Image: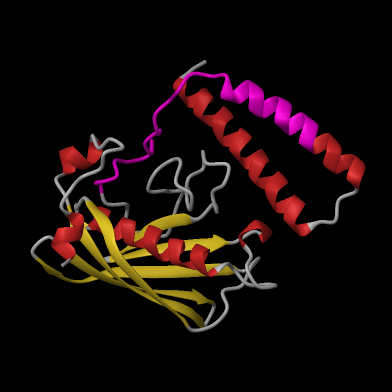
């Protein structure tokens, strides 16, 4: 199997799992079907768990540090292929699209039922994740590697589930290794949330080769 066809197969499997998850949240399912789902998914999970360990697959359309094209999105774009927000290979992904408009990063998504908090509204943590993800594209626009140091979110209104939501983010300033960003989340004209963040830049080669030990010095840089 070619790399392209293998990637497509993973994307199809991830999409199927996402569809099942949203259906289980949104629909009332009878016990017989629930039992069947539990048995069959457990069997499939056991088979998948028996496979070899693998590493995260990078985005095939462009490098993380290559700025996305300055146009409306011709195709799905993500920070990482397995991002929890935009990754097409992640079965838990929100399925968001990301692109660039000038010096602004833009995210667009219609959140499914599994991302709900209060009835009809997205979970606040998911809204914060949308902001953080969009700010990641700002890093690509400015050719920086960085980690989120602080993220503050002000919720202005409920972010709806099942409707198109847009997040826009940009660089507001910098000070040494600190990058300051701002963002807004809107559903049409409705302002749902605003975000302010401090990112801490790191060496790109170390970022790309990072292990579970992480890169030291972020906390001390914030203080």
The answer to whether 181 is drawn above or below residue 192 in the figure is above
Answer yes or no: is residue 70 visible: no
Front residue of 34/57: it is 34
| Magenta stretch contains residue 44 | yes
Task: Name the side, left or right, on which 174 lies relative to 62.
Answer: left
User: Residue 196, how many percent across, how many down?
Assistant: 31, 74
User: Residue 131, how many percent across, how many down?
Assistant: 40, 65
Residue placed furthest toward the top = 1
Q: Residue at horizontal 68%, vertical 72%?
A: 120
Q: Residue at horizontal 65%, vertical 29%?
A: 45
Task: Name the side, left or right, on which 129 lies relative to 160.
Answer: left
User: Residue 51, how many percent across, how many down?
Assistant: 54, 19
The answer to whether 169 is drawn above or below residue 29 in the figure is below
Give the magenta part as a residue range.
38-66
Q: Residue at horizontal 45%, vertical 62%?
A: 130
User: Residue 127, how many percent across, how many down?
Assistant: 49, 67
């Amino acid at each position: 199997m070619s790399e392209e066809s293998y990637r497509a197969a993973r994307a199809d499997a991830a999409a199927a799992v996402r569809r099942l998850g949203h259906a289980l949240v949104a629909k009332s399912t009878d016990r017989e079907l629930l039992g069947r789902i539990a048995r069959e998914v457990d069997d499939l999970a056991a088979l998948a768990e028996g496979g070899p360990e693998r590493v995260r697959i990078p985005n095939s359309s462009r490098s993380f540090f290559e700025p996305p094209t300055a146009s409306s999105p011709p195709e799905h774009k993500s920070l990482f292929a397995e991002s929890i927000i935009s990754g097409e290979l992640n079965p838990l992904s929100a399925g968001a699209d990301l692109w660039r408009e000038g010096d602004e990063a833009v995210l667009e998504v219609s959140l499914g039922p599994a991302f709900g908090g209060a009835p009809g509204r997205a979970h606040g943590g998911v809204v914060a994740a949308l902001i953080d993800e969009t700010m990641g594209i700002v890093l690509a626009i400015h050719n920086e590697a960085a980690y989120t140091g602080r993220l503050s979110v002000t919720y202005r209104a409920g972010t709806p589930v099942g409707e198109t939501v847009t997040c826009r983010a940009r660089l507001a300033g910098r000070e040494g290794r600190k990058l300051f960003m701002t963002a807004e989340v809107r559903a049409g004209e409705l302002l749902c949330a605003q975000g302010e963040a401090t990112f801490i830049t790191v060496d790109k080669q170390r970022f790309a080769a990072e292990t579970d030990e992480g890169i030291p010095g972020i906390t001390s840089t914030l203080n």
